[in-house]
């Protein structure tokens, strides 16, 4: 069944009846976090989302972007992990031993290898290490912060904006739970050889050994990242990852009232994400998903397909109906080339778009005869009047 909707000529095509009848919406989950976002790494399924696009100060979670820029520069050959970075007076006073903030206790005016700085930032949440990386890569922390925001936009993070490399309170510095979770997934996918640093239990520098600040690591739940943060304004936050029972999940939670609440809420959400869902295959690679109308074509419709298997994680219990649709701007204009991207498959769990996948023309449709194009024009005119 095809359904034309919205006078702007955006069309939604209902999926096969068997698929439309699939059960949906995730079982009720309550969290004391003000913002939360949980995704499955394999399928991209959004398992839970609460105020995920609300902006809040990142605190030390901003260091995930600092680390990403350094990882990217190492991978591209721009810098070497063995390269020494200078600990300036600014880095020492703002983030070093005298600052009263998270630090790796690097000595002022010393030189520290980048690899050690990264361990300090990831394991200790070291502000002196983050500033040293920023100054070494961009000349100043301000210039580096601009690079952070530019890089965020390139990665598809449209809201997150950075003012410094540490996450220390600064006007205009904000992130969202959705975008931090997306950034965490990117770090795992893009830098697998360095991701293990996030689960490193401790690190010693300048004769001082400190344990990893991530409270999930000792819980034996499969946690292997990423970072915690705290500001007076926005409370306690965490971006976390877990791998267990053949599954990998990423989550961000913010706005909690204490360290204990942060650890407990993160553990509960990740445990629920692992236990409460099962994988459901929807379409195989190349399988026809739906049809789209074609204007002025040799045939009136074209079949649509995805370029990969489409699967989603659905709740095991307390299911309601799952809604799925293909959305495209239509009707499509002939000619249509096989493999041309023409729309998106959207799968809803309750009120949340849980997954979105591009769909492509499964066949080519050439231009129709003159009389067929005339009939299509009349049909579109009539439909336009109805709208």
Image (spheres, helix red, strand yellow):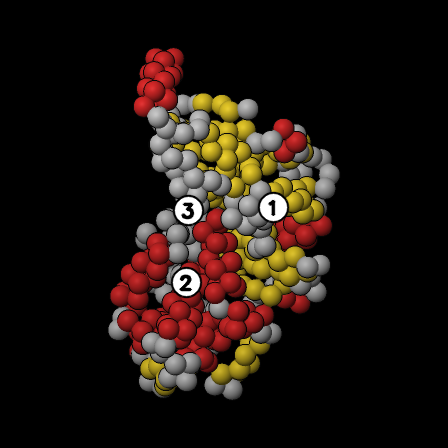
Q: Which corner quadrant holds the N terminus?
A: top right
Percent position (x, y) of residue 219? 68, 64
Q: Which element carries disc 2, helix, strand or loop?
A: helix
Upstream in the sequence, badge 2 or badge 3? 3
Q: x, y percentage for residue 68?
A: 42, 66
Residue 18 image position (x, y, % from top left): 66, 31
Residue 74, numbered circle: none
Instruction: From the image, state whether disc 3 or disc 1 is nearer to you.
Output: 1
- Give x and y (percent) for residue 312: 61, 45
Disc 3 from disc 1: Cα separation: 37 Å
User: Would you say 333 lies left or right of 222 here?
Assistant: left
Between tags 1 and 2, which lies in front? 1
From the viewer's side, name the closer residue of 202 and 209: 202
Which numbered marker is on residue 65? 2
Sequence-first disc among 3 and 1: 3
**Secondary element type, mark 1:** loop
Q: Residues under labels 1 and 2: Cα distance?
A: 36 Å
Q: Which residue is mark 1?
A: 284
Q: Is residue 231 visible?
A: no
In this rendering, the label closer to the viewer, 2 or 3 = 2
Using the rendered view, name the quadrant where residue 333 is placed: top left
Residue 346 vertical placement versus 212 (above, below): above
10 Å crowding of disc 3: few (<14), some (14-19), many (20+): some
- Report the residue marked by disc 3: 55
Disc 2 and disc 3: Cα gap in Å?
A: 16 Å
Contact, mark 2 vs mark 3 (Cβ under 8 Å): no
Q: Quadrant of residue 198?
A: bottom right
User: Residue at coordinates 53% horizontally, 82% vertically from top-left?
Assistant: 204
The image quarter containing residue 240 is bottom right
Is there CB contact under 8 Å for labels 1 and 2?
A: no
The crowding category of the residue bearing disc 1, from other C-alpha atoms within 10 Å (few below 14, some 14 to 19, many at least 20), is some
């Amino acid at each position: 069944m095809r359904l034309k909707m919205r006078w702007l000529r955006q069309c939604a095509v209902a999926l096969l009846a068997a698929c439309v009848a699939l059960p949906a919406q995730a079982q009720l989950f309550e969290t004391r976090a003000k913002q939360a976002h949980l995704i499955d790494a394999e399928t991209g399924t959004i398992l839970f989302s609460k105020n995920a696009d609300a902006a809040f100060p990142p605190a030390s979670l901003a260091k995930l972007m600092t680390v990403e820029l350094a990882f990217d520069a190492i991978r591209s050959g721009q810098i070497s992990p063995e390269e020494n970075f200078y600990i300036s007076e600014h880095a020492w006073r703002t983030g070093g031993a005298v600052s009263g903030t998270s630090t790796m206790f690097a000595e002022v005016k010393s030189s520290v290898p980048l690899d050690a700085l990264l361990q300090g930032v990831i394991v200790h949440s070291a502000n002196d290490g983050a500033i040293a990386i920023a100054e070494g890569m961009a000349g100043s922390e301000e210039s580096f912060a601009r690079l952070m925001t530019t890089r965020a936009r390139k990665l598809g993070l449209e809201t997150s904006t950075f003012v410094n490399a540490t996450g220390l309170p600064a006007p205009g510095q904000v992130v969202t739970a959705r975008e931090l979770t997306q950034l965490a997934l990117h770090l795992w996918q893009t830098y697998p050889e360095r991701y293990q640093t996030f689960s490193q239990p401790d690190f010693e520098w300048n004769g001082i050994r400190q344990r990893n600040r991530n409270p999930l690591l000792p819980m034996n739940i499969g946690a292997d990242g990423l970072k915690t943060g705290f500001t007076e304004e926005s409370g306690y936050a965490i971006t976390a990852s877990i791998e267990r029972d053949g599954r990998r999940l990423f989550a961000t939670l913010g706005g909690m009232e204490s360290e204990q609440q942060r650890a407990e809420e993160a553990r509960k959400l990740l445990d629920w994400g692992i236990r409460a869902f099962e994988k459901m295959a929807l379409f195989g690679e190349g399988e026809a998903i739906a049809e789209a109308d074609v204007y002025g074509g040799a045939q009136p419709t074209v079949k649509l397909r995805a370029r990969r298997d489409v699967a989603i994680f659905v709740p095991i219990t307390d299911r309601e109906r799952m809604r799925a649709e293909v959305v495209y701007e239509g009707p499509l204009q002939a000619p249509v080339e096989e493999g041309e991207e023409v729309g998106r498959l959207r799968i809803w769990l309750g009120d949340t778009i849980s997954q979105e996948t591009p769909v492509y023309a499964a066949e080519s449709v050439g231009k129709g005869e003159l009389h067929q194009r005339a009939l299509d024009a009349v049909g579109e005119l009539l439909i336009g009047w109805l709208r």
